[in-house]
Image (tube, rainbow, N blue to C red):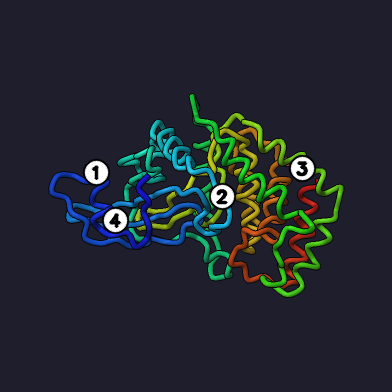
């Protein structure tokens, strides 16, 4: 396997065979922070591209192993979008795919920024942005899917860090290093047996194949603002599952980024496909809990008291 790194020489990248005749690489840069995969922007004398490569570990957390075939899930996901003109316009087009080397060359959507700044209280989502994000889910969840590859390995990885690891009393993570006092706050949830039983059942449901194509990680880090509008990226946790999972994750990040209360109601009003909103709330609660007391931390600007309040609200979501 060709192992691409951030500082790989141009000669190695030039040898991939992705380029047109006479095309030469002129510049390599990092377009933004990526949690799962190596992502590079490749500029040539004929255009600009995004190159992604999956490794056997999580890029942001190298100590965590991850299925290297996840790049195929993203490839297949993006191929499915091609049958819907709206969805095809919302994500980058696949230009080249190299399965043996776990490489994919994508259309460069241009300079942009994700929505992680929401967590710092620097901005609020606009109604039209929420509408666009819900429209995407509506189109996605209505796609007719055939022969989508198994996502068991990726779903197992995600299951561990959503439904299990955050709720272990001894998981090796000292949350006081993130915020003094958070470790003690977390213990009431890690020792809450009724809560953990519901979360375990919900996790078992998550592991089963569902009926719709879900994005699988529908949060502000997967929304990219570019000159042509909001685009949706990084569907490596996608696959057949519950529409309610996407909706629950989506709404959880409204809570985590302190968005206006009426935006949640807007989502429920606008999403007109059949949905179990009690299940949505349960997924919403688990996502809040795992983001505050698990390893996948966010750049939130919440005080300890605010986190206590939000954790308590998340518990009510799960137990509703």
Question: Left or right: 101 with respect to 309?
Answer: left
Q: Secondary structure at mark 2?
A: loop
Q: Secondary structure at mark 4?
A: strand
Relative image position of residue 26 (x, y in whole percent): 21, 60
Q: Secondary structure at mark 3?
A: helix
Relative image position of residue 129 (x, y in whole percent): 50, 54
Q: Which residue is mark 1?
A: 17
Image height check: is 231 above or below 33?
A: above
Q: Which residue is mark 2?
A: 65
Residue reaching furthest left?
22
Q: Which residue is mark 3?
A: 200
Relative image position of residue 239 (x, y in whole percent): 54, 36
The N terminus: image quadrant: top left
Number of other residues with Cα within 10 Å of mark 1, as a class: few under 14, some 14 to 19, many 20 or more: few
Q: Which residue is mark 4?
A: 42
Closer to the camera in the image, 260 or 257: 257
User: How far apart are the two marked residues, 4 and 3, measured between alpha carbons?
Assistant: 43 Å
């Amino acid at each position: 396997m060709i192992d691409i790194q951030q500082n790989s020489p141009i000669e190695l990248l030039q040898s991939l065979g992705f380029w047109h005749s006479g095309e030469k690489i002129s510049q390599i840069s990092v377009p933004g922070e990526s949690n799962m995969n190596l992502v590079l922007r490749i500029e040539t004398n004929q255009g600009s591209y995004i190159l992604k490569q999956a490794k056997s570990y999580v890029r942001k957390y190298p100590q965590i192993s991850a299925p290297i075939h996840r790049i195929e899930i993203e490839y297949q996901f993006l191929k499915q979008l091609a049958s819907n003109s709206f969805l095809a316009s919302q994500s980058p087009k696949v230009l080249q795919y190299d399965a043996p080397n776990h490489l994919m060359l994508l259309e460069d959507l241009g300079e942009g920024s994700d929505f992680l700044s929401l967590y710092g209280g620097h901005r609020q989502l606009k109604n039209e942005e929420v509408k666009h994000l819900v429209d995407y889910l509506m189109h996605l969840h209505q796609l007719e899917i055939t022969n989508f590859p198994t996502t068991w390995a990726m779903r197992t990885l995600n299951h561990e860090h959503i439904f299990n690891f955050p709720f272990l009393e001894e998981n090796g993570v000292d949350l006081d290093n993130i915020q003094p006092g958070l470790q003690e706050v977390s213990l009431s949830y890690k020792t809450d047996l009724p809560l953990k039983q519901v979360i375990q059942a919900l996790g078992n449901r998550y592991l089963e194949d569902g009926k719709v194509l879900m994005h699988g990680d529908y949060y502000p880090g997967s929304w990219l603002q570019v000159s042509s509008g909001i685009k949706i990226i990084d569907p490596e946790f996608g696959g057949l599952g519950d529409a309610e999972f996407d909706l629950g994750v989506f709404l959880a990040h409204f809570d985590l980024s302190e968005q206006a209360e009426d935006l949640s109601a807007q989502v429920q009003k606008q999403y007109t496909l059949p949905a179990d909103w009690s299940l949505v709330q349960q997924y919403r609660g688990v996502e809040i809990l795992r983001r505050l007391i698990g390893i996948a931390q966010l750049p939130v600007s919440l005080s300890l008291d605010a986190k206590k309040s939000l954790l308590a609200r998340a518990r009510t979501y799960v137990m509703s």
